[in-house]
């Protein structure tokens, strides 16, 4: 983990350097865009579709709970933006050009939803952990609750995949889909050589660079993949951002 340089802590009403404010707003916009995607027609249709794929009534209830928790995370980010004086208009909120990345991918099966929870939501937990001791104090305050939710989502994905992998057919299906989802999750951290990620650390908005966070993710998730009886994909295969 990187050693943070000495930095000032800020509340929403405090004057702050322009670079700090710009990076903070960028971080919050990405968080808000991805999480509130579920409120719009395609996202809503996707999660209704996933609920219909759920193998049990209990699983369907968990999908509904998941939807509520992720949406709440997005609304928290929008509130933090508004507290900074960045008003999100209805037109912008419903805009087409939102930062979605993995969240805009249609999930075809319950197995894919399990992989999404296990990998993508685990990345979400890693990202939220960066904010726990953030120099922006309002973000530090909300981080533990988001980490708790994302931990639950990642664990739920592992549990569902473990159920699926109990049959040879299910395990083969997970193994078939795993390389693309693993690559996607690794890419969610961004470029390892990103100068912006270094500045986030130097300013105290994050604790680790993109590359450091990704390496920690790999160390955690690869033993879990093996525990499921699966082969770990090559970490460089199908990647966009190394």
Image: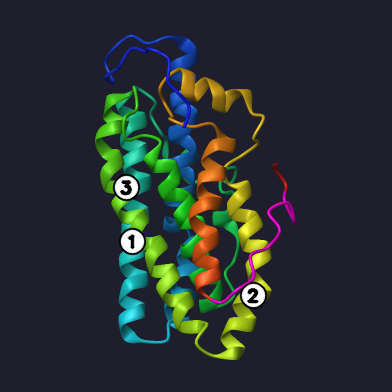
Q: Where residue 1 appears, x then y in whole percent?
A: 47, 32
Q: Identify the residue at image location x=37%, y=71%.
A: 63
Residue identifier under label 2:
175
State left or right for residue 42 relative to residue 57: right
Residue identifier under label 1:
152
Reading the chain from its start, which is encountered first: label 3 or label 1?
3
State left or right for residue 221 relative to residue 195: left
Q: Identify the residue at image location x=62%, y=62%.
A: 181
Is 229 situated above or below 215?
below
Label 3 and label 1: CA atoms lie apart by 10 Å
**Residue 50 seen anywhere in this rendered image of the structure:** yes
Q: Does the magenta stretch include residue 237?
A: yes
Reading the chain from its start, which is encountered first: label 1 or label 2?
1
State left or right for residue 28 relative to residue 119: left
Label 1 and label 2: CA atoms lie apart by 23 Å
State left or right for residue 146 relative to residue 125: left
Residue identifier under label 3:
146
Q: Where residue 99 appears, x then y in whole percent?
A: 56, 43
What SS does tag 3 mark?
helix
What SS does tag 2 mark?
helix
Q: What stretch is highlighted in magenta?
A: 229-239
* Front-lying residue, 133 or 43: 133
Q: Identify the residue at image location x=56%, y=48%.
A: 100
What SS does tag 1 mark?
helix
Q: Residue furthest right?
A: 237
């Amino acid at each position: 983990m990187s050693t943070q340089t000495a930095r000032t802590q800020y509340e929403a009403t405090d004057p702050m350097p322009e670079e700090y404010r710009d990076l903070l707003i960028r971080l919050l916009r990405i968080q808000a865009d991805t999480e509130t995607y579920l409120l719009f027609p395609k996202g809503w249709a996707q999660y209704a579709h996933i609920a219909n794929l759920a193998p049990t009534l209990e699983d369907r209830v968990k999908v509904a709970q998941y939807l509520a928790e992720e949406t709440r995370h997005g609304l928290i980010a929008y509130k933090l933006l508004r507290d900074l004086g960045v008003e999100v208009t209805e037109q912008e909120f419903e805009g087409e050009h939102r930062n979605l990345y993995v969240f805009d991918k249609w999930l075809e099966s319950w197995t894919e939803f399990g992989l999404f929870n296990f990998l993508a939501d685990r990345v979400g937990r890693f990202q939220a952990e960066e904010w726990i001791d953030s120099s922006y104090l309002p973000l530090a305050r909300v981080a533990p609750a988001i980490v708790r939710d994302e931990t639950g989502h990642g664990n739920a994905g592992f549990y569902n995949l473990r159920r699926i992998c109990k049959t040879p057919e299910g395990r083969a299906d997970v193994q078939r889909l795993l390389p693309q989802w693993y690559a996607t999750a690794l890419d969610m951290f961004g470029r390892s050589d990103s100068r912006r990620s270094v500045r986030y650390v130097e300013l105290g908005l994050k604790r680790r660079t993109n590359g450091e966070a990704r390496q920690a993710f790999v160390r955690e998730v690869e033993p879990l993949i093996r525990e499921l009886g699966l082969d770990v994909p090559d970490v460089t295969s199908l990647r966009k951002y190394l």
